[in-house]
Amino acid sequence: MSTALISPEKIESKIYLIRGKKVMLGSTLSELYEVKTKAYYKLLNATKIDSQKILCSS
């Protein structure tokens, strides 16, 4: 895992506005955390975190 910081501009460019909510794709989040998308969703399920809340929070 890299320790380099990601610029706010790069993150902001990955956020989409859909039906009035700010949304970031799971594949983008997994890329930011430097894990495979499948592993990211497995972690969400294992920790009982509401993925809809994370992915669609505004």
Image (spheres, helix red, strand yellow):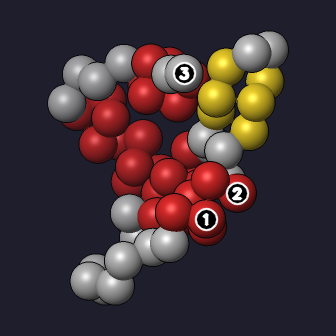
Q: Position of residue 54 (x, y in %)?
A: 43, 28
Q: How many angstroms separate mark 1 from mark 2 (CA)? A: 6 Å
Q: Which structural element holds mark 3? A: loop
Amino acid under label 2? Ser
Q: Position of residue 14 (x, y in %)?
A: 67, 54
Query: Pointer 2: what residue?
Result: 13
Most extreme residue toward the right, as rendered? Answer: 19
Closer mark to the observer between disc 3 and disc 1: 1
User: Which residue occupies 34% across, 85% down?
Assistant: 4
Q: Which of marks 3 and 1 is nearer the N terminus?
A: 1
Relative to residue 19, is residue 4 depicted above or below? below
Residue 37 can be seen, yes or no: no
Relative to residue 20, is residue 43 depicted above or below? below
Relative to residue 31, is residue 37 depicted above or below? above
Q: Position of residue 11 (x, y in %)?
A: 57, 59
Q: Where is residue 57 in the image (x, y as percent from the top left)?
A: 50, 22
Cβ atoms under marks 1 and 2 closer than 8 Å: yes
